[in-house]
Structure formats: structure tokens, C-alpha cells
Image (tube, rainbow, N blue to C red):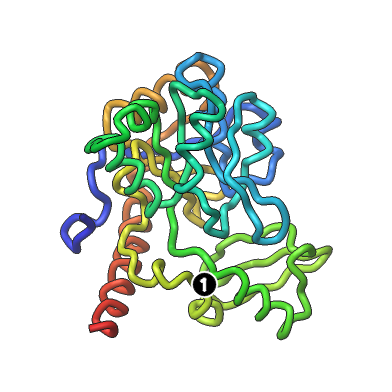
Amino acid sequence: MVTPDNLLGSVVGVYLARAKDEEILKRKVASGGAVTAMLIYALEKGLIDGVVTAKRVSGFEGQAVVARTREEILETAGNKWSIVPFAARVKAKIEEEDLKKVAIVCLPCQAQFFGQMREFPILETDFGERIRYIVSLFCMGTFAFEAFLNYLRMKYDIKAEEIKNMALKEGFLEIQHDDSLLQLPLKEVYSYLQTGCLVCADYTGTWSDISAGFIEKEKGWTVIITRNARGEELVKGAEKEGYLEVRDGSQVMGDILRAAREKLARAQRNMMSLL
């Protein structure tokens, strides 16, 4: 449980990492492509037989997919900005694809679900045993996309199919649409977050094996938090085999804690308003 005294959960190591493969770095990834590189490493070395993640189809529209090849993993690289019916589909996806050792890339709320399924199985023991790695992305919240897209259309004349990419900057949400770039102050889009996100206190995904995100001052690098031996071995293995460049990330802990504290405070304020 996230508390003011324990904002990040279990932490074994904090790193800055980036892919060494130029093809990965050229893709539209949020930071240094480290998550993509680790997943490709795990797949090519037989540590997993597939990755379940979300893939953006157009605008905010996304779907849960299984990536079983290097190219399929590359196609899923990038920001995840909408909640898809992910958790509800993962079990079916794993069974449909007959996956025995799967990595799941998800958000903190989803990492809690999968982490509890794996650690405290009740009936679906086989499902939990198939989850090899849980990778959580840092998350301040996702949008109630229908309402937000309607807002963008009405105020800025931006249609969903025109959105090419979005990125969080300091105090802004940048939306690339066609050949233009719109900067929206975060306070302007705050009211369009999913209701559940407004009371979620977990920024990094404390139930995961590895958490990943980015810090503005370390552009081109992925912030990696390992939480157990499983996560640590994945990072070190990918580095040893030449998939990752890794350096110490202790200097960004202040930034991570600041964002985690902000999300917890927001959740506490919103919870109080519901009482």
C-alpha cells in the first residue's frame, strides 16, 4: 500500500537505461526504449514466449495484443494513453495463444491486479503461474477518452484520427496532430482523467517486478525501478547480452518521489471530497 512513508514500495535498484539497438531508438517511444529492449531480450533468450500489452490503433483507441516476435514488440512501443479492456482480456489472450511464460506491460492499477493474481492465487492458479514478468509504466492517470476527444474537437478542432502522438512535458500535455503541435496546461485537462485515476495513489506500480518511466531532465533515457530478484535479473541480463546500456539512476529519485507524492496527495484530496 502506498503511504507518505512508503511512496515507491519495494525497491532493489534504480537505473537509467536505454536500448543499444538503433532500430528501437528510432521508434516512437517515450524515452530510451529500454522496456522494448528488455522484452526483446527476454523473448529471444527464451525467458518468455510472448508479451501481452496495449497497442494504440488510432487516436486514443487501443486494444490488448499479444506480441510473439521482435517486430510485433516494436509495433507496440510508445505511450499508452487510454484504458483498454485489458485485464478482462489477458487471461483469454494467454489461453488463446497458449502462452506458458508471459510478460505483461501495464499500468499501476493493472499491475496490482496481476500481482495479486500471481502471488495470492485463489482459483485461477494456472493463470498466475504463467505470468513471468509484470512491467508497470509510471502513470499520473489516463483519460476518459470519449469526453476528452469531444473537448479537443469542440475547442481545438482536433479529431481523434489526426492525433499522432502525445507526451507529458513539464506542466503540459503535448499533442501532435497532423503537422501541428498543441501544448495544453495539465490543469486544463485534469478534469478529463478517469474517475478511478483521481483516487489512485500508486504512481510507479508497486506490485510490478519492474517499473519504468521517464524524467524530463534525462531525455533519451528510461528510468527503471527493479523491485525483486526477478526484475533485477532481467535488467542485468539485458545489459550483459548487449541489449541495454545501463547507468546508476539514484540522482533522479527526488523527481520520482516528487511525482509519487503529488499523486498520493491528489488521491487523498479526492477521497476526502467523497466522504
* Image point (27%, 77%), residue name: 271
As rendered, which of 95 and 24 lies closer to the eye? Answer: 95
Q: Against 260, is 128 above or below?
A: above
Residue 267 appears at what percent x and percent y? 31, 71
Q: Against 176, is 243 above or below?
A: above
Q: Against 273, is 48 above or below?
A: above
Residue 144 appears at what percent x and percent y? 54, 70
- Give the image quarter of residue 272: bottom left
* Image point (53%, 32%), residue name: 51
Image quadrant containing the N terminus:
bottom left
Q: Amino acid at mark 1?
A: Gly
Give the secondary structure at mark 1.
loop
Query: Residue beneath label 1, please?
Result: 171
Image quadrant containing the C terminus:
bottom left
Residue 15 appears at what percent x and percent y? 39, 38
As rendered, which of 107 and 255 lies closer to the eye? Answer: 107
- Give the image quarter of residue 176: bottom right
As rendered, which of 29 and 134 lies closer to the eye? Answer: 134
* Image point (55%, 30%), residue name: 96
Q: Residues within 10 Å of mark 1 (few under 14, many from 20)?
A: few
Q: Against 67, is 199 above or below?
A: below
